[in-house]
Image: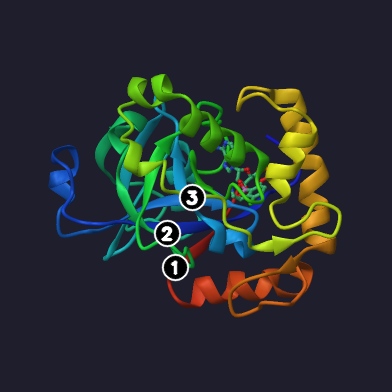
Amino acid sequence: EGVLPQDYLLIKMEVIPPFPSKLKVLEGRKLFLAAATLRPETMYGQTNCWVLPEGKYGAFEINDSDVFILTHRSALNLAYQKLSKIPEKPTCLLELSGFDLIGLPLKAPLAFSEVIYALPMLTILTEKGTGIVTSVPSDSPDDYMALRDLKSKEALRTKFGVKDEWVLPFEVIPIIHIPEFGDKSAEKVCHDLKIKSQNDKEKLAEAKRLTYLKGFTDGKMLVGQFKGKKVNEIKSLIKTLLIEKGQAVTYSE
Ligand code: A2H
């Protein structure tokens, strides 16, 4: 836990019905994987969602209409931030593991693909955010390497029951231009630093440091309604827009 609170945006990635048998008791509800992000302006580049296979999650009643899948820890925090049907008390409708979530088809705000899928990432921390991460491989080195691992390693897909069609058709989408790194900054930096896999912790930390700040200070949008504008000028506008459309909520911890 850091000293200063971290303000995240939770992106509501809607689970497309009909639900698989494990989730059948939730049929008829509006169900979302709630992904914590610091980079709302990158949501155009979403190619999938990440879950921790061994992670423990729950489906929580947020209000009269919405049910969020996230960690119990984050559900308790949300309950103290007016995001629980019963104030200050999370209501878990169903216990789930990350394995139960792999392969869920999702509709994600601002994403170009109509459907993207929940896939396994082995480096997700359960003590941060919601334990659900949306994947933007163009601009996030972690996302880029985890997607590359799944694409290049058939054994990894088999191990987690990941179907080829949930992964192989999804390519890195250029969404932000950074003068120093081009249109796919994460791919370039991972390549330049010769990062081998999603487990290459130290190099990935360096890749994140290099791209994160530059994306904000020097990045320019290549797509969407703010095309041509600088990231630091429109980041908060996209956040507000997503909240107003009911596609995201704020969360701090
Ligand atoms: B970011 P900070 Cl394009 N475990 O969103 C591991 N990573 C997590 C997480 C968890 N439990 N919860 C959130 N995150 C990721 C987009 C993005 C992000 C881009 C580029 C960089 C980036 C798309 N993924 O983060 O430690 C989420 O990924 C680089 C730091 O709280 C979230 O924002 O600073 C970010 O880490 C929060 O990390």
Proximity of marks 1 and 3: CB atoms separated by less than 8 Å:
no
Q: Amino acid at mark 2?
A: Lys
Sequence-earlier tag: 3 or 2: 2
Q: Which residue is mark 3?
A: 35
* Circle 2 residues within 10 Å: few <14, some 14–19, many ≥20: many
**Residue 161, image x and y in percent?**
30, 27
Q: Give the CA separation, mark 1 to mark 2.
A: 5 Å
Which quadrant of the figure contains the N terminus?
top right
Residue at x 62%, y 22% (from the top left corner): 199
Proximity of marks 1 and 2: CB atoms separated by less than 8 Å:
yes
Q: Give the CA separation, mark 1 to mark 3.
A: 11 Å
Q: Is mark 1 within 8 Å of ligand 1?
A: no
**Residue 177, image x and y in percent?**
75, 62
Sequence-earlier tag: 1 or 3: 3
**Residue 50, image x and y in percent?**
46, 40
Residue 12 numbered mark, or none: 2
Above or below, 164 relative to 214: above
Residue 97 numbered mark, or none: none
Proximity of marks 3 and 2: CB atoms separated by less than 8 Å:
no
* Circle 3 residues within 10 Å: few <14, some 14–19, many ≥20: many
Above or below, 201 relative to 251: above
Q: Is mark 3 within 8 Å of ligand 1?
A: yes
Residue at x 44%, y 68% (from the top left corner): 247
Secondary structure found at label 3: strand
Sequence-earlier tag: 1 or 2: 2
Q: Is mark 2 within 8 Å of ligand 1?
A: no
Q: Which residue is mark 1?
A: 247
* Circle 1 residues within 10 Å: few <14, some 14–19, many ≥20: some
